[in-house]
Amino acid sequence: MPKSENFFEKVYEVAKKIPFGRVTSYGAIAKYLGAARSARMVGWAMNASHNNQEIPAHRVVNRKGLLTGKHHFDGTNLMQQLLESEGIEVVENQIQNFSAIFWDPFKELPNNL
């Protein structure tokens, strides 16, 4: 298992690169970082990042496009509101057209983070 403090920083570096209007998954970030079985740790990193405005934690969802981390955001629908403000349609906690707006760091970033 990756050492959490260093791992969290690597997660944040990837999350900062997610483009406006796109989303990725916990597992995709974990896979990119060479820790494919650490999707849950990516979720913990996102949860720990909520005081840092530079990290777009709202753009990280589960592998099916569900807003599984929404209860960690202030307010009842903040995660959904942030996504919708970027033009992402969310219906019943599910991102619509998920595959079309999915951002895969493995394909989009050089593998040298």
Image: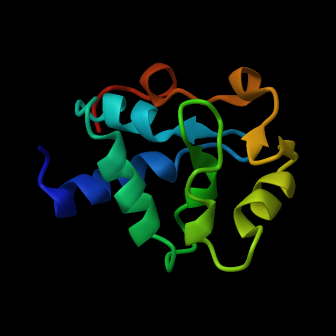
Give the residue drawn at x 36%, y 60%.
45
Q: Inspect this view and state whether residue 108 appears.
A: yes
| In the image, residue 58 above or below residue 26 | below
Q: From the viewer's perspective, is 53 left or right of 101? A: left
Residue farthest to the front? 92
Q: Nearer the viewer, residue 112 or 100?
A: 100
Q: Is residue 60 left or right of 29 when viewed as pictured?
A: right
Q: Nearer the viewer, residue 44 or 104?
A: 44
Name the image quarter holding the C terminus.
Answer: top left
The image position of residue 48, as x and y in percent, is 39, 70
Residue appearing at x 53%, y 46% in the figure = 17
How far across and how far down the image is residue 59, in percent? 62, 49
Residue 77 found in image quarter: bottom right
Q: Quadrant of the N terminus?
A: top left
Query: Residue 81, percent across and down?
Result: 82, 63
Seen from the viewer's position, the closer of residues 93 and 12 is 93
Query: Residue 107, relative to residue 91: is it above or below?
Result: above
Residue at the spot 26% in from the left edge and 32% down from the top edge: 37
Quarter of the figure with residue 90: top right
x and y percentages locating residue 3 in the rendered image: 12, 54
